[in-house]
Image (spheres, helix red, strand yellow):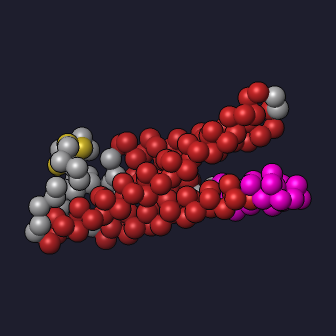
Amino acid sequence: MTEGVRGGIDHIGAGDALSPGPGGGQPGRVRWSRRGYRVLAWLFAACLVIQIFLAGMATFVDALNWGRHSSFVHFFEYLPLPMLVLVFMARFPISLRWLTGSLLVLIAAQYATAHIGGVPSAFHPVSALALFWIATHLGQRSWQLIRADARMLSGLTVR
């Protein structure tokens, strides 16, 4: 157990998250995995903003933009897969692991709600909001854990 960024306890086990590796810091693989994860989380969130913008363009400007909206998703729909690998390599808490996996479930829900028609299709923008919220939360939380690790290495206390 280690003290979390907000003063709570993260139950992540020995050798995980903030516990030091050999030499007092995280192994290089863990540090680079954390950085890569953070980059992918924010890239995924940015792609969601573009995707929502394209939906707005199709709704309010020109229906031809639906093609762009439908095509652009193929650029980023698989980003959660390397994120899922990195979240384990980065030794992040289990909550981040579950939330990362939930991105894949929500992307599948996006496809289902886009093509099912009727009232269930109304959940398409709702699940898009959930995707965006989770992606930004993952980006923020990974940044907090990276900063806490850096503070620990510099001898500062984590609050």
- Most common secondary structure along the magenta stretch: helix
Boundaries of the magenta span: 55-77
* Residue 23 visible from this viewpoint: no
Q: Where is 4 relative to 29, above or below? A: above
Comparing 155 with 94, the one in front is 155
Who's the residue at 32% across and 47% down the image? 93
Residue at x 24%, y 41% (from the top left corner): 11
Q: Is residue 74 magenta?
A: yes
* Residue 115, x across and y down, in percent: 81, 38
Residue depicted at x 23% and y 68%: 150
Residue at (23, 61) in percent of width and height = 148
- Is 132 in front, or is 10? 132
Horizontal placement of 39 versus 49: left or right?
Answer: left
Camera sees residue 146: yes
Taking depth in this image into account, of 89 and 54 the one nearest to the observer is 54
Q: Looking at the picture, how far across and down is residue 1, in whole percent?
A: 17, 44
Q: Nearer the viewer, residue 139 or 89?
A: 139
130 left or right of 35?
right
Q: Position of residue 24 (x, y in %)?
A: 14, 67
The quadrant holding residue 149 is bottom left
Q: How many marks?
A: 0
* Residue closest to the far top: 119
Q: Position of residue 125 (x, y in %)?
A: 67, 42
Q: Please identify the residue farthest to the front as the structure is shown.
A: 60
> Quadrant location of the C terminus?
bottom left
Q: Is residue 6 magenta?
A: no
